[in-house]
Amino acid sequence: MNYRKIIFALIAITTISSNVYSQKTIQNVFDREAISLNGSWNYIIDPYQMGYLDYRQKPFDESKSGKGGFYDNLHNVSKETKVEYDFSNEPTLDVPGDWNSQDQRLLFYEGTLWYKKDFVVKPTTDKNYILYFAAVNYECHVYLNGKKLGTHKGGFTPFQFDVTSKLNDGENFVVVMVDNTRKKDEVPTINTDWWNYGGITRDVLLVSTPKEYINDYKVQLAKDNKKVIEGFVKVKGINTSQDVVVEIPELKIKTTFKTDNQGLVKFNIPVKKLTYWSPNSPKLYDVKITSKLDEVEDKIGFRTIQTVDKNILLNGKSIFLKGISIHDENPLLGGRLRSDADMRMLLTWAKELGCNYVRLAHYTHNERMVQLADEMGLLVWAEVPVYWTISWTNAETYANAENQLAVGIERDKNRASVIIWSIGNETPVNEDRNVFMGKLVDKVRALDDTRLVAAALEIEREGYKITVEDHLGDKLDLASFNEYGGWYWSNAKELPKYSYDIKFNKPVIISEFGAGALAGFHGDDDTMWSEEHQELIYINQLEMLDKMDGLRGMTPWILVDFKSPRRQNPVFQNFWNRKGLISNTGEKKKAFFTLQEYYKKKTKQYK
Ligand code: GCB
């Protein structure tokens, strides 16, 4: 191979990977001027990727003409034409929404499906246009008016394309090929305990901004300092400095800063009197940021979070995290959450349970979910799908995981509710994993040093002694781990005999415990799958955990039953993981009330 070839190959590799993962997306997209592309999209099921690959398995979009794929969006216009697909004669799927819950044929489908949407826009020359996807699972190729915009991997994080120079004046169409095939080296990997919902699962927006616009900002309290608001504003599209104004009218703050030539300014604003955000008083302030041409508004809460020995301090005061784990799924649909109402339903259930905290497992949830947590007063553990057995030594896998983590942090950095970034769940202890996850911890701290870093670790057992000593814990802020006493090991009645030896002087958070039960199925407390058995496990778990030195919170598994291909018992499961405290039809099981009582007790203890 000669040098020119090597250089060319290197350029090709960098171009591919820079295309594949999300670039930083515009901050607070839901406040921007936009045309919503939600609604009905025509779709074609394409298990052989015949709309993408020719008969030699070469992508049409890499051919000389770039044509030949379904993204051409052709129709048979006369009796002589032969087009073997036609979006306009196909049915539609709702966006946002996974495909599995919308078409019976697609319930178990893992493969390729094409979406197409027509829209009308009259672009003006004083504007920039951004095509924004809040999430598409898993890999997608996006085409506008027959031309490729790019590809994206990662099913839970947002991404966008600048389409300013690519829009027609009037009619346009966007085509997206989505592939949710599970692959070993991806994040998550092939094995998960949740449904692999495919499709355009979250909002699609055509955002318009002025030519110079506020692309990003952060307005938060400085690390551990209740008296200083700190942050930055980044204006995109300028190469001279300009004034930006940060306003918080209720605090009588209106301060003008000058950006540098790159459009960036970092600032500090001292504050005297502030109502701090907390679950009991989720105070959000209107914040307005103005640049020469642009303006964006947000509602932001201010709080500090830190740990001191075994305590978690919220605004300087010790708290107990009364939590529950949640998947991004509406059990009533058996599909991904599609609307604010869906999200509110779950968070309202969590409030009813007495929670001040939720674990949004096991991947980045909807941005609206986190905004609602801000509004409703729920602290949040946010997570990336570094789940079970990732390809620890594969550099691409690491880049993907790090990207998903970074995009989530960038997106939600202004949310007071988010206090914990979790870098993964139940990963097996070994050197390669320690390096991989250790790097993720460093990455989080480099991006955001104001929040806590955690992971759901595992325990070790010998007789009645349980040890928690995973060395990854040395780098984390919490001693957080999952344990399934009474369900995957031992039995409910033995639980009080166990004792814990936790090798960290850190707050202890039980990131999971739980047991399955079919709502409405009753028996004595030894009867597997009965509500009484689940209830007994909760009673004895809580008794066991409550004795633990340093226990500062928990997120039992899980708020609601959720769909999983791994749960095959035809009588009790039927592809539902039954560890919910609420059934898939919204019925509360007995254990719901056990946990509710425990949380009432904790509320009294942590006044
Ligand atoms: C776990 C996992 C969670 C599973 C749960 C279960 O430890 O973290 O994703 O769904 O157990 O039900 O087995």
Image: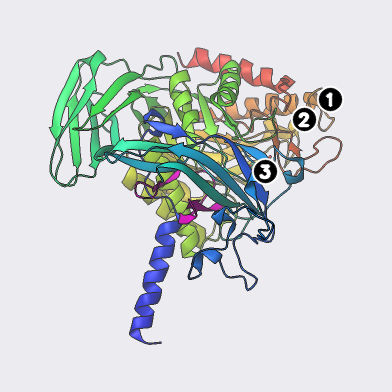
Q: Label 3 belongs to which residue?
A: 195
Quarter of the figure with residue 421: top left
Instruction: Please state which amino acid type lies under the numbered disc 3.
Output: Trp
Indicate the position of residue 141 as horizontal and vertical percent values. 52, 54
Question: Between tags 1 and 3, which lies in front?
Answer: 3
Which residue corresponds to the image point at 40% horizontal and 19% vertical from the top-left? Answer: 278
Residue stretch rendered in magenta on the structure: 139-167
Q: Label 2 belongs to which residue?
A: 517
Which residue corresponds to the image point at 41% horizontal and 70% vertical from the top-left? Answer: 12
Which residue corresponds to the image point at 24% horizontal and 40% vertical from the top-left? Answer: 212
Q: Label 1 belongs to which residue?
A: 521
- Circles 3 and 2: CB atoms closer than 8 Å: no
Q: Quadrant of ligand 1?
A: top right
Q: CA distance from mark 2 to mark 1?
A: 8 Å
SS at badge 3:
loop
Q: Is residue 309 at all visible to an observer of this figure?
A: no
Quarter of the figure with residue 407: top left
SS at badge 2:
loop
- Circles 2 and 1: CB atoms closer than 8 Å: yes
